[in-house]
């Protein structure tokens, strides 16, 4: 099973402003031929940034999520623009969404989402040594930010509106990084 | 910001076998009008199941992921079929992908993925008291399963081909549930 299936043909079956849906015809090593659909997003992925203040407060962003039709609490998130490195995107998104930049930004993981259907990947960062340095973003309304004590990650994970698997994972990665349980 | 944006119009802009892409016209509380795209999948979500044997071995599944064009190691995963509860889907997928059923199946979390773009949600389960009870699935090739010691979650998380944010999160949820670090 270490032999990759052979890609016989890839066809774009639907296209929108943000997404391409491809149909991929595959032949598996056992001879079986199947068609799988996958979603191909723009660009090279996205970043998620956990901003941590000098007094051990996490900065959260509250933003309308049209997928779930509700406001969601989460960390700084955004697409990596063309020509940007993940690090640069982390700094830019942090400034746009919180008004702070960070002296230290460190990548904790690169994760996939629904790898069976999508090439979407997210780089998870922790940002420290925060200082004011706002940058205008393209949000339809001013984002509300909130502080949350690092000491109460359990309370954060239990919130109904803190549901993004990447944000939840990031709380564990940051706790591990900082040696907190 | 507790006032939800008003949905003015929802239009299907692209459609494929598995996906619908909708354009949603919104008016935010501040009067700004924008259009967001979102992806609407079939059905009511998916399950991810962490099977844990009596001798503290995790069962992993190795499956071709066309999104990343490589084999990925992960936990049991699949869609909740029409008319199924998440619990029922967890039992069925476990039987199809590993050949085992479980005496005890417990939901640890319900998480979203890219809530800004999608309504996709995954119920994360841990399955214990495993016993043989295979069920035919619809996979194009026989799935390879592997055992991984619960005592070495760090080694699992460090693997390049164990990249799904939900699988990574599940390792922390299971460790927390079992009181292991």
Image (tube, coloured by chain):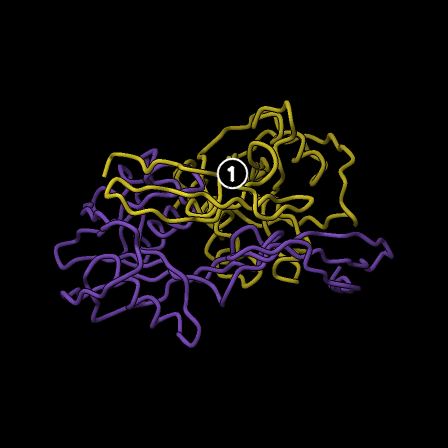
Chain colours: A yellow, B purple
- Classify residue A5 as left or right of residue A48: left
Q: Residue at x 19, y 61 (%)?
A: B99
- What residue is drawn where x is 65% and y is 30%? A81
Q: Position of residue A69 (x, y in %)?
A: 66, 62
Residue A20 position in % (x across, y down): 59, 43
Q: Is residue A85 above or below residue A46?
A: above
Residue A65: give x, y in percent of width and height.
65, 55
Residue on which disc 1 sits:
A122
Tell me which corner region of the image, top left, top right, bottom left or bottom right, holds residue B109.
bottom left
The N terminus of chain A lies in quadrant: top left
Which residue reaches farthest bottom?
B83
Indicate whether B97 appears above or below B73.
below
Q: Chain of mark 1?
A: A
Residue B30 in the image: state x and y as whole percent. 85, 56
Mark 1, other Cα within 10 Å: few <14 / some 14–19 / many ≥20? many
Q: Seen from this angle, which residue lies furthest right?
A: B31
**On screen, B69 above or below A65?**
above
> What residue is at 51 percent from the left and 48 percent from the top?
A167
Q: Nearer the viewer, residue A72 or B26?
A: B26
Secondary structure of residue under mark 1? strand
Count of marks, rendered view: 1
Q: Is residue A112 left or right of residue B3?
A: left
Classify residue B123 by image quadrant.
bottom left
B99 and B114: which is toward the camera: B99
Q: Could you say which is closer to the camera, residue A122 or residue B153?
A: A122
């Amino acid at each position: 099973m270490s032999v990759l299936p052979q890609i016989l043909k890839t066809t774009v079956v639907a296209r929108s402003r943000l997404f391409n849906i491809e149909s991929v015809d595959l032949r598996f090593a056992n001879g079986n031929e199947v068609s799988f659909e996958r979603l191909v997003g723009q660009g090279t992925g996205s970043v998620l940034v956990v901003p941590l203040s000098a007094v051990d407060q996490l900065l959260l962003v509250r933003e309308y999520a049209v997928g779930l039709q509700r406001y969601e609490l989460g960390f700084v998130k955004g697409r990596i623009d063309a020509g940007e490195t993940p690090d640069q995107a982390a700094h830019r998104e942090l400034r746009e969404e919180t008004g702070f930049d960070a002296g230290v930004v460190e990548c904790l993981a690169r994760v996939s989402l629904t790898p069976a259907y999508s090439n979407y990947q997210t780089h998870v960062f922790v940002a420290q040594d925060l200082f004011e340095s706002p940058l205008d973003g393209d949000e339809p309304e001013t984002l509300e930010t909130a502080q949350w004590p690092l000491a109460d990650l359990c309370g954060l994970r239990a919130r109904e509106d803190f549901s993004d698997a990447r944000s939840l994972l990031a709380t564990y990665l940051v706790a591990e990084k900082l040696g907190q349980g």
